[in-house]
Amino acid sequence: MLNPTYWLQVVVATPAHSQVAGPLSYRSEFSLASGSLIRVPLGKREVMGVVWSCATEAPTGVAEEQVRCIAGVLDGISPLGESWRELVGFAARYYQRGLGEVALGVLPPSLRTLDNTQLARRLKREHNKREEQAGLPQAAEAGELASEAPTPSEAQAEALRAIAEATRPVLLYGSTGSGKTEVYLRAAETALGLDPNAQVLVMVPEINLTPQLEKRFRDRFEPHFGSGALVSMHSGMTPPQRLSAWMAAHHGHARIVLGTRMAVFASMPGLRLIVVDEEHDPSYKSQDGARYSARDLAVYRAKVESERHEATAESGRHCQVILGSATPSLESWHACEQGRYLRVNMASRIGGGSLPRLRLVDMNHQPKGVSLAPPLLAAMEERIQRGEQCLVLLNRRGYAPVLACGDCGWKSGCPHCSAYRVFHKLDRTLRCHHCGFTQRVPRACPDCGNLDIAPIGRGTEQIEEQMSALMADMKRPDGTAVRVARMDADTTRTKGSLESQLAALHSGEVDVLVGTQMIAKGHDFRRITLVASVNADSALFASDYRAPERLFSLLMQASGRAGRDARHSATAEMWVQTWHPDHALFAALKTHDYPGFAQSQLLEREAAGMPPFGYQALLRADARTQESAQAFLNLAAEQAADLTGTDEVMLYPAVPLNIQRVANIERAQMLVESDSRLALQRFLARWRPTLLTARHSPQGKGVIRFAIDVDPLSV
Ligand code: ADP
Ligand code: ZN
Ligand code: ZN
């Protein structure tokens, strides 16, 4: 033979649940490293693939002459590392998706679409950009970095020591304003100083909500590492931006990657530290495609990186992971109790400020029909007269969740969903928040012609309107009128609007800000001394067993926006309007007793065999009719009965989802439980192939799609 032949296993993008889940065989005239990005023929198309392995022997069981030759190699991009491949392989296995779907899905889309000439041009441009930056001050000694940084408090120094020595994942449990971010910055500084190629990954729930965090990292590290040292990664970026950030991380030019959950898959060959800020936040769990938990994958990734390298003297592990929160997830809390994670506490606020006092307003004793109780209003007025700011939190945008006819009972239902359309008064529309269907508000009841159709319930628009009316006669210290503003998904839709609204709040142009939970998270507001939650009760009695956990953390988070400046902290208050002031959740909230709350929740969960004591997965089906969705699930359950290992799991009956129909698609699900993670995993791996058969059987006819959700956030 003239040319030696190399046999490659190549991973290509495959549609969800396709039969070809694993790598495909190709041949090549030259040897290629695992992780190389190449182009291969697939059917009549040419697609991008990742080399998973390369051998000199033909794989057994393939007809050699049918194996096609690769089409080319993506020039100028170094192969993806072994730990990256291991992470992707694990994610595909654990979350029951195709390897190709995950591997190719987490790479920047432009890699797939650009040809070699375009790619070369892109790489050249990146190179030039770096050359320019090379003129800027370069990597300094770690000690020098700290010059502009505050001296760590005793608690911070203690936490940093514990982190440095930790050989396990660290849960940094610190109340809001305790200086966790400063600990991340210091830990990052240490990690970056470990070797010249060291990289740090910082994950945040929603990048748009945390421009401040990004700024703090930039301010701290860019003067020393140059302006290309930090890149962000989130879904709001354009494809060229994503490609550029990805390349910078992959080739090691970016030392810090700051991103949302997708960033957990960033290729970072020098990774030494992963920070997951607000680790309890539900947005770390992907809700479509591969439904992965970026927090859990971060822990896995750090473990893989550490196993791959010898631990160094400077740090207990090669790659450290820090999960930070004031209200950790019960999963992480439990992992600390079990000793799998190390809990590091930072109890007090920076500057010795105290946490806001909780004030419960018993709505049973308030005038009928008020949305804002008089004592709350009075407290707000007091603040405003002192030149301080207030936040009012309501978890519903729009003016009112429903519009209804008093005569015939018509309600503003969505014709395409089993949900009501929300009344938006500003543009007089009825909008479905599930499918987006929008119409002008009808002049009269569409069913009976009655002119008197009225809103029921309240949303942020209405609270803003009422607040403005109620405060019309109040005055600010300088005698001017009170300024009320609103911030929610509606007011922040256009680019830059979020930043400008936050800036207005920071600079004191707003006295009262009304908004949804997006205002509760992360922001370091300086002059807010009162935060009010006006309608939190629905979560107290929700069927979702995680609802109390979420409410508790939301209220803690929200109250954490108040009194962040120690000068104001003595008067900072969190007001909660409730019809159930005696609820145990409020008792724990009052004393800021997260450990107590967590313990009682964990006891309940243990008694009920719920996560983190039991393990769950959902099989979900979308179909034209509810019957076909459920028929598919029932067939899947029948097929499961024939598999081995089914006795280790418990299959529940198929049920419609809470919001059963969205955009004319009927949705149903089936819960699978086991008290062993491994048993559940084994079962799912056996079950998945049978689902494909079920999908193509007569019972699967009306099914549009199905998905397995491992460790679902709500069931
Ligand atoms: P968290 O992330 O826990 O909410 P931050 O890190 O944002 O807390 O700290 C709260 C505030 O205290 C910030 O304004 C920060 O700049 C300041 N801060 C943090 N650490 C220190 C320190 N050691 N000395 C002085 N100020 C600090
Ligand atoms: Zn009517
Ligand atoms: Zn709808």
Image: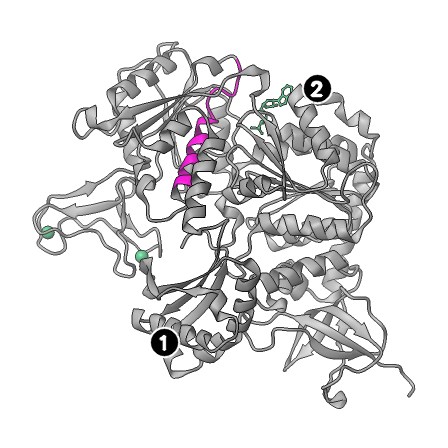
Q: Quick check: which quadrant has ligand 3? A: bottom left
What x and y, as percent, mark residue 601?
43, 40
What x and y, as percent, mark residue 113?
65, 65
Q: At numbered mark 2, what does the secondary structure look like: helix, strand or loop? A: loop
| Protein image colouring | one colour
Q: Which residue is drawn at 82% across and 69% down?
A: 32
What x and y, as percent, mark residue 272?
75, 43
Q: Can residue 105 be seen in this view?
A: no
Q: Residue at x 23, y 28 (%)?
A: 363
**Residue annotated with mark 1:** 702
* Range covered by the magenta-colored residues: 548-566
In the visual, does 289 lie left or right of 166? left
Answer yes or no: disc 2 within 8 Å of ligand 1: yes
**Residue 193 drawn in magenta:** no
Residue 151, which numbered label?
2
| Amino acid bearing label 2 | Thr
In the visual, does 309 lie left or right of 563? right
Which comes before the other along the chain, label 1 or label 2? 2
